[in-house]
Each structure stands twice: as C-alpha cells, then as structure tokens.
Image: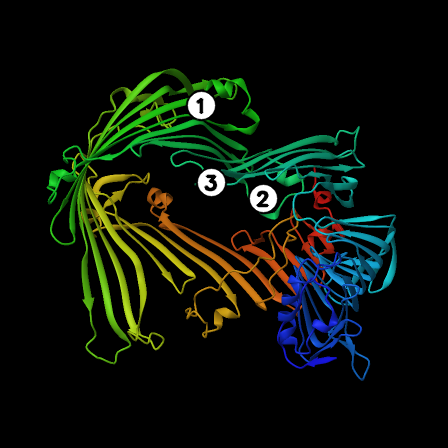
Amino acid sequence: MVTQNNDSISYFEPLLVDTDTLHFETDSLRNNISNATTSKRLSPDALSSSVKYKSQDSIIINLKNRKILLFEDAKAYYEDIELSSAFMEFGFAQNELYASGIADSCGHIHGPPIFKQGETEFSSQEIRYNFVSKKGKVTKVITVEGEGFIHGYYVKHVDEITSYIKGGQYTTCNLPDPHFQIRFGKGKVIQDDKIVTGPAYLSFGNVPSPLAIPFSMFPLHKDRSSGIEIPKVGESIVRGFYFENFGYYLGINDNFDLLFSGDISTRLNWAAKVTSHYVFRYKCVGEIKLNFFHNYYGERGTPSGRPKNDFQVFWSHKQDPKAHPTTSFSAQINVQSSDRNKYNPSATNDYLSNQFNSSLNFSTNAKGFFFFDAAVYYNQNTQNRSVGLKLPAINMSVRQFYPFRKKNKAGKLKWYDNISMKWTTQAANEIDTKDSLFFKPKTWDELKSGYQHTIPLTIPIKMGKGFNWNTNATFTEKWYLQRNTQDYVFDNTDTTWKKQYTFQRGFNALHDLRLSSSITGKIYVFYIPVFKKALVREIRHVITPDVSFNFNPNLSKQTYGTYYNPLKEKFEEYSYYEGAMYGTVSSRMQAVARFVVGNNLEIKVNSKKDTITGTRKITIFDNVSISCGYDFAKDSLNWEPLRITGRTHLFSFLDINFGLEFDPYVLDKNGDRTNQKEINVNKRLMRFSKSNLNISVNWRLNRDFFNKLKKNEKSKNEPTEPTEPMFSTNNLGVPNTSPNFNNPWNVTINYHFQYLTSDRLEYYKHLTGKKYDSKITQTVSIGADFNISRKWKVGIITGYDINLKDFSFTQIKIYRDLHCWEMDLAWVPFGFRKGWEFSIKVKAAVLKDLKLNLKDDYIDNIKY
C-alpha cells in the first residue's frame, strides 16, 4: 500500500500488468508501465485512453485489491470526462469508478460529485461509472439540460447521450429545492434532443397540484423545431370567450420559419395571422406578417350590429452590405386598415402612432460614376385617413466632375480647375387621396406624373484665410403630364360661388434658372478678463458673416392663369402647377441681396475636474443669426423683414429656440403690407411683427445622474446609459423582457413649451383692442419606475396637455420578480384603452407556455 501526500497529477495506462512490475513510488509507476508495453499483451478490456487523477489530501494505492483511493478535492480526467468529489475510488479489476461526498461530524455532506462531459454537467450524491461500457449509475442527481434542471433520485447512464431517470422532476428554477417542479416517475433523457416522461404533474414547493398530464416531452436541442403555439385564453363582452394567438410554428430550415396563428371567440370574431422570418448569411434578413381581423360589434340581427374587417401587411427586408458591392435592395412595408390598431390587440407604440410609412428601395451604380435609384413610397395617416403613393420614384445622377481640370494634373490647382458640374434627374408618379377612394377608378385617372432635370455649375474661389467666394448657376427643367385650371362657378343648389378645379392632361415643360453668389467667412474674437483669478478665464465669440446675391429671371411664360373672384370682385392670378410634386417657377424676376450674420458664444471657466488645463468650456449660444435682404427687381416693398433667430443647448437636457421678426413697412386696415415705411409714418425704424419661443426639456434622472464619482468621469448632467424600459410591447404595455433592477429609480421628464405672437389683423381694422395675437402650448410627459424592494418594481407613463387640460395615454405597471417566475400587472385607468392585464409566467423560454393571463378587454369600453 502506498500513500501519496501531494497535488501532482498521476496516470494509469490502458494496460493490465503483473503487480510485481509496479513500484511503490508513484512517480516511477508510469515509467515502469510504459517499459512493460514491449513485453506484455493488451487486455481486451483495456481502456482506450489514459486516466489522469489527483487529490488535495492523499492518494492510496491498494495493489492487492487493485484499487486507488483519492481523498479531499479529488479530480479525475478521462477523454472528455471530468469528475471531481471529496472521495473517489478506482477499481482496476472492473474498470470502474466510484465517487461520493464525505460527511462531517454533524452529518452534513460536503464535496458531492460533479460530473462533466462535453456540455453535460451534473452534481449528485454518489456516482458509479464504468470506463469500458461507458455506463453509469447516479444517485440523487441534479443536471443542467438547456434552460432547465433535471432532478433524479436514480439515474442510469447507458451511453454517451442517453440516460434513464427514476423519481425525477424537471424545473427551470436553479435552487436545490426549486420553487416548482414537474414531477414524474420515470423518464428518458436524450442529450441535446429531448426529455420524455410518463405521467407527470405540476408541484409548487413540493406541494402537488391537480394539474396533471399523461405524458410530457421537453425539447433540449438548440436548433430549429416545430410545435404548437399555446394561446391566451380570456373573456370579454364583445368577443365572449376567446383564444388569442393559437397556432402552429414550423422551423422549416436554417433560413426560414413559419408561424400560422389566429384568434377565435364564441361570438364568431376571428383573426388569421401568418408570420415568417428569413435569413441568409452575407445576403439578407427579413420578416413578413399577414394579418386579417373580422369583428362584429353590437347585437347580431339588430340595426346597431355591424361587421368590421381590418388587415395588416408588414414586410421588413435588409440586405447585407457584403451581398453586392454596387447594388442594394431594402424594403419596409407597413400597410394596414385605419382601425386596425384601434379595434384589435396591438402594441402600445402602434396605438399611439397614426403615421405609417412604407418604401421599397433599389439602388445601383456604374463604376461609381453613374448612380440609379428606384423606389416606391406609401404613406398613411390613420387619423385623417389620407394616403399617398409614389410609384415609382426614380433618381439618376452622375458624380460631380471638373470639366476644366486635366487628368492626372500635377502642381497647384488654378481657380478654374475647381469649377464643377453635375447632372440629376428625378421622375415619379404620385397619388394623394383618402383611403376610401384609393381603389376608385377616378383616383387613378388623376395620377400625377412629373420629371425634373437639374444641372448645377459651381465656381468656388478662396479669398485669403477664412473667406470663400462661391458662385452657383443651376438650370432646371420640369416636365408635367397634367395641369390644374381654376375658376369660380355659381352653385344653384345653395346659391353660392364655389371654386372649381379642372384636371387637364398634356405635356407641359417649365424652365427655371437660378444664379447665386456669396462670400462667407469666420471671424474669431477673444475676450480675456483682466483679473487672473476671475471665474471666467476666456470668452470666445465666433462671427460668421454671409453676403449673397440671388438672381432668378422670370421664365414662367404660360404657367400662370387668372380668374375673376366674385367674392373679392377682382381678378386673381394662380399657377397651373400649384401643389405639383417638383413645384412651379417664379412668376416674377428676383434680384435679392441678402446678408446674414451668425454668432456663436462660448466661455471658458475654471474647473477642478480637468487636471490638465484646469478649465471647462461652456456654450452660451450655439448660434444667433441676424438676416435681412433687399430685392432690386421689385417696384415696391423691396426690403425683407429683419429676422433674428437663435438656438442653444444647456445642461445636456434643455433646448431653447427663438425667433423675432421686425417689419420696416406699415400695415393697412386689411393687414397687408403697404409701400409706406415705418420710419416715415410712425417715426421708428421697424415694427415688431412676430416671434416664437420653444423650450424643450428632456431630462432623465436616476441615482447615477447625481453620482459625481463615475469611473468614466462623466459630467454630472450627462445622462447615464439607458436601462430596459418597463413599457415596450403588448396591447397594454407588458414587456417581453424583465425590467432592470440595477437603478433603484428612473424618472424621464419631457416638457415642451411654445409661445407664438403675431400681428392681430382686427387691430388694424379698428385700431382698438390687442395689437398682437398670442398662443401658448404646453405639454408634459413623464415616465418613471421605482424599486419598491429587490423584487418589486412599479412604473408609470403619463402625460398632460396644459392647454386642453386633459391627460394623454396613462399606464401604471407593477412587476414582481419571482425568481424563476415573473408577474406583471399593467393598468390603463382611463381613456380609450382603459383596461388591465395580469400575467404570471415562467421566465425560461422552454416553459414559456406555462403561464396565466387575465385581462379586462379594453374593446368592451368602445361605444359604437
């Protein structure tokens, strides 16, 4: 008998040899066995690989009984098998291994066996394993299979992938004594495939429940699989008893899947849904949804009863950039009936949106010089039921080129070498109508077609340091295949004059020429305080002057018409192409000289946080600009109003925009500008005309917001990284993922304030009353969530329109982390979506259908 008291790794080879060839020194054991291989035959029961073993305390080799005993933190390695336990015994005669824990003086077992093979790992009370047959027997085992845990009183391991269990239970709870179990008498485990059991029942905390099934099967494989989609069950007044999202999922292959699902209720309301995802590596990824809903509201057979059909077509397609170097295709289609999100279960974000845009885009280029883009655009507004379609919209262009620059020219470029040209063509067919008229023949008869060709010429010249002189000449040709005429006709029905529009087909060409020249630059002014210890170290003022001249000749020719307005008793001019997709051309010549002066103001203050410069830069104004212009081509009212606009961003959450306008001309009693100047009539240079002020606060507050000691040295006003929102999906906002408990509280505040003032026309008619009209708009929206405890979280999202004195969409949510389960309660206390939804479910995806859903259907509150 040999005792070893070290932590070195020893071996025994796949041989059976005479005992007298073994030496007592374990270090020489391997060498002597290796020398014997030339004279001894391999046993038919010999192992195919070496077994490595070690222990923390001691190793005892019993030569008489051909056993090796390992004590305290023993480990053994055989091929891909790793076993560790407090006690381990190798039997050479049977090629068998036994492992178990050791009881202390109080009877507590420590160091239980832990078995690892490939991705399989489990702990147990004791293990017996045969290296030759690769079969084993395990007592009181806990093993991890996928997202779940298998507990078994006896487990028989018959081969590398198959095991039999007696007295087993399956759970997704990772505690030794789980919160819930699916108990079964006998079962079979096929690694990375499935678990099949006999009769099973659901148990909570070792307390059995009456929920039982004759057999069960749990999938363990990670690849695609098919199966039944378990529905939501509920009851409402409008639908009766119903099933939601009941269907079958097909994992077709690695590239496609398909889900057929639907809703059905006892009141014969139903829905059919088809969803498919596809992915091709290095090519594309996409999703398709086809949904149809049939609902019946009111009592059947009564005047109040009526059917309602809704639909949704959704397609998202993204091409991988690696798919093709010059050609790309993408799609984002979301077409639905106007009431789809109103009368059918939908996500909260969809319900709060009323604008849906769809597009198909194809683009390619030829050697990076000629570019071609084709697209189909569809926009839909479910609030005013308007739709718009462009089919197709085509863009063609060539890369900017330099006609006077020689190829491969060496040396410094001349001013004319930088003269550049470009060519662009746009074409589209367009429809704008209401959704109820979209498929009417008259709508398509009024399809608008347009083409626009643009050739810009650019001449850039540098004028010393910081100043540039840019001259542009742009020729535009517009082709329309229709035009609109206007006139007033007398309606004998209600004896009123009404404006009449007439749609006329025909080819129409419009020409436009625009010439512009501008000089821009930057002037830097620095103000340095006299006192060295002043808080403000430096003030930087950046002045950006821009002086320009724009000339547009009158090329309108026959593009304008006139009609007699009997209401105003005078002739009025109008454009045949008013509202055309590429616009019209100016009906008069323009020659406008304009100046704009932009200002940026920053200060540099002392800062102890910056250990290098000791200063910090603060922006006071991002930009404050002053602009005015003079039109030489006008016979009167040559001066444009003086405009002052500005914007700034403060404290990382506050945005301010403002604008002021001053008019040098006097208004008449109708509120129209006259040729009389304010300085001549009212002895003032200009008259205040209008203003606007917009203040937006987007403030995210949490614990880290006030924490000045961040690892990455964030400023105290910089928002922290976003956490998982509590409100994301489902018809009442119940999220698909668990909330984040890292921050004990989060508050998001959005406040918008707008103040508008403008001349009040009634004042100039009577010269009494208020001189200006003013309007104030204020809205507030708040989203917040709080940790009540380590497992409870409460959230709220709401808003308030101060002008309308009414709340916007409001929702209160309560979440409880139940370790391996989770509970959600979402409540909308008032409004169109008034209702609640309660859900308690298992977190693990493998048992996602083990859940309870209850809700008060908001559809019951709709008045028809």
Q: Left or right: where does residue 565 sit relative to residue 636? A: right
Kindly identify which residue carries mark 3.
320
Position of 53 relative to 397 (above/below): below
Say which element carries label 2.
Answer: helix
Residue under numbered circle 2 = 350
Q: Nearer the viewer, residue 538 or 410?
A: 410
Q: Residue 150 location, x and y as percent?
A: 77, 59
Q: Quadrant of the C terminus?
A: top right
In primary-sequence order, the first of circles 3 and 1 is 3
Check disc 3 and report its element: helix, strand or loop. loop
* Amino acid type at mark 2: Asp
Front in this rendered view, residue 76 or 608? 76
Residue 268 visible at all: yes
Circle nearer the viewer, 2 or 1? 2
Say which of 655 and 95 sits in front: 95
Q: Quadrant of residue 391?
A: top left
The residue labelled by disc 1 is 498
